Image: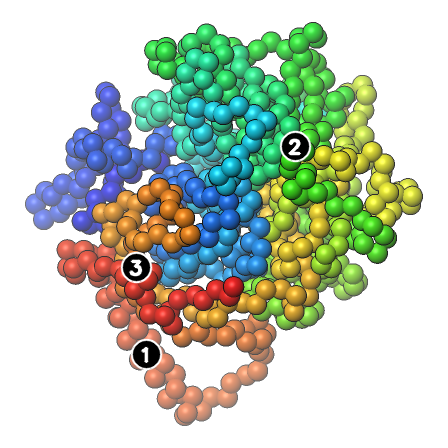
Amino acid sequence: MSMMSYNWSAFQGFPVDYNNGTFYKKISKSVGSTNHVCDQIPLTEDELEEVLTVDGNYKFMFAINNQFPAPTLVFHDQQVVSIRVYNDMSNEAVSFHWHGMFQTGSPWMDGVSMVSQCPIQPGEFFTYQFVASPPGTHWYHSHHGAMRRSGLAGAFIVLPKEGDKREDIPPVDKDVVFLAQDWQAAASDIEVVKEMAWLMYSFSKSSGKLGTQMRTYDGSISSLTHPISRALVNGKTKSFSASDTENEKAVPMEIFNVTQNGSLLLRIIQTGMTGEYKISIDQHKLLLVGSDGGDLIPTWIDYLIINPGETYDVMVFGNNTPGNYWIRLETTEVLDFFYNPVQPNVSFAQLHYQEAEEALPDSEKRECTVSEPCVMANCHWSPDALKRWEPNTKCVPINEVKSTPKSVAQVPVPIPTSENDLQEVFLNFHFSGSDLISPRPAVNTIHYKGPPVPLQLYPNIVNDQTVVCNNQDMTTCGDYCQCTHVVKLSTSKVTQIVLMAEDGLSTGTAHPVHLHGNRYYVVKYGVGVINETSGLLQGPNQDIEYSPDYRSAKWRNSSWNNGNIPDMNVKDPPLKDTVVIPYKGYVVLRLKTENPGFWLMHCHLETHMSVGMAVVIQVGDPMEMPKLPDNFPMCSSYPAYNEPDSKSKSGSGEKSGSNHMEDDALLQLPSTDGGSTKSQSVRNSYHRDDYSIMNISVGWFVLMMILMVLFVFGFCALSLVLISRHCTWTFPARSRRGYHDIDTEERVVFSK
């Protein structure tokens, strides 16, 4: 069960069981000279506060400040943010990406391991400092390895400045976070990614059979990786299966409270690892007002499609009979792998009117009719495909949702003044390159491989052709090409990025793509060719012509070059940082490259990104990029620290920032008592193979003996340190110093 009661004195956890309305923890009981016999005692009220119920199954997971989901961080627009991250994990490095933050002037704070920074190693800390912008609903998550879904993700809310609030929507009574994600009861995210890398992603552990992937409305493959359990809302979920265990029956679901004639603002964030969900509230419409920090002209909808990486702001009004109503999170899976109809998987949360008694809802979905059709926002299927399954539902793709006039006035849609003012690049997010028996995730047939050193810290490595490739001279790369894929763009130009999802295969999946350090306008959307009889995809959109290996593409009609694409919305398109590419379709993005740096662009399905579906967008030359701060931690030079006060759940420590915030607004952990190590530059030889052979001599023998003695001594010293950390009954707890107490040379100095 994902429930744990911590015995801080021994620094170990005990499983929790539920029985007859009481939660118990297992403890070891001494019998004679042994202590391997288990006993159980009820949890105290304090211990119950630290229980993570999730779905009622035991599972290894991560947590920030012992919380899951991670703490919500709230700031104001243009506030200077200072967040110190301590890595308390024993074996895992980590870095944190502040999803939706521009990092203008601070690209090294973007938090992408081996692109903007070196990962934070176990026992180290790192202080992120940047300006919170733009206002809106954002989030933060681990960007090293596969840990996001397992606990290292939370909401990052940036409030508008005083006097800059919206006037086109009514004020709300409550402003709440709605974190949605997929969940697997048994497998860890690391296992899921490895299965993808080992070509096992279509193999189900639960059934032991191939072909367990499901299909969506147009026959494309669902992006959910099976076997999934249930969707979580704010770390909670509930099922009503007869096979549920006592622990599963005991777990609570998330409840959102509203008063009659009152209102809620739901800040919906999709923090999942794989898969999209269709969110609705029984007998209630949703007013869509924002996405990815951009304000949208209010639009009434019934269903919201949301993919990993996306955020949406919706308003809910308590204008129905007081009672309890289901909040549904449905998968978009309507066919199995062999095209047989299936029922979508449904997970639940609850909308509760405070005037009514709290009880399980018995509500039903609103019936969609010809006279009163339902509206599905962020739909990425052809209307001809959707009508087979939802005949009275209108499909509204994201490009048909419009930005507010005020938003467009603040961030104008970039329009080129000449041909030289426009740069256009085609990026195909797809499966390509045969390795044994199956294709692999790629961009333009290149499978992204992380560089040996962070690009932002060592920018000259982009000139090393043994590490970095640019999709131009790929004759020696072969069918399965792995390298650090970098696409360079000029600064201060109108940039048009055409995203595609075509691989020549008969079946595949849509891809949610996120661009770091920038937002873009979604000015055009194109879906694949649909068979009018079956409603299934039968070919790619004909607007684009691909090379035989799908490594390059161009507009089929040459008159579309130089930004002359018909039917583009350059008046009031939506402003996004994550967008879904329909399978065999395309999306046209517009932005102005005004933020020099190295910015990752990747599929936000972690099973795809971690195995190669990513590319680095280099904006400008290194000389145009902001100067790295003095004493910025390079690889292997983060300062060490001591064990935090384990009895403190949220930590204590001083806050940094220009404005006063609430006590829990900043992610604060205890201060440190450790010193910094000397900065060590990583030389080019760090990633160079050395095939020279050592000659055996007496000198080498003596050197090896010395090294062995040092190794034994170091091993003993490390053992003592570990014992001192984990046996608090032997060594007294050590306190940390606050940030302002750290010596000047230990701090990171930020250039103005």
- Residue 138 visible, this orientation: no
Q: Quadrant of the N terminus?
A: top left
Q: For the residue labelled by badge 1, is the local secondary structure a helix, a strand or a loop?
A: helix
Q: Which quadrant would residue 54 be assigned to in this image? A: top left
Mark 3 → mark 2, Cα distance in angstroms: 44 Å
Query: Which of the two marks, 1 or 3, is nearer to us in this view?
Result: 3
Q: Label 2 is placed on what type of residue?
A: Thr
Q: For the residue labelled by badge 2, is the local secondary structure a helix, a strand or a loop?
A: loop
Q: Which residue is mark 1?
A: 710
Mark 1 → mark 2, Cα distance in angstroms: 66 Å
Q: Which residue is mark 2?
A: 404
Q: Which residue is mark 3?
A: 738
Q: How many marks?
A: 3
Q: Residues within 10 Å of mark 1 (few under 14, many from 20)?
A: few
Residue reaching furthest to the left: 32
On the image, the x and y values in percent for residue 230 come to 47, 28
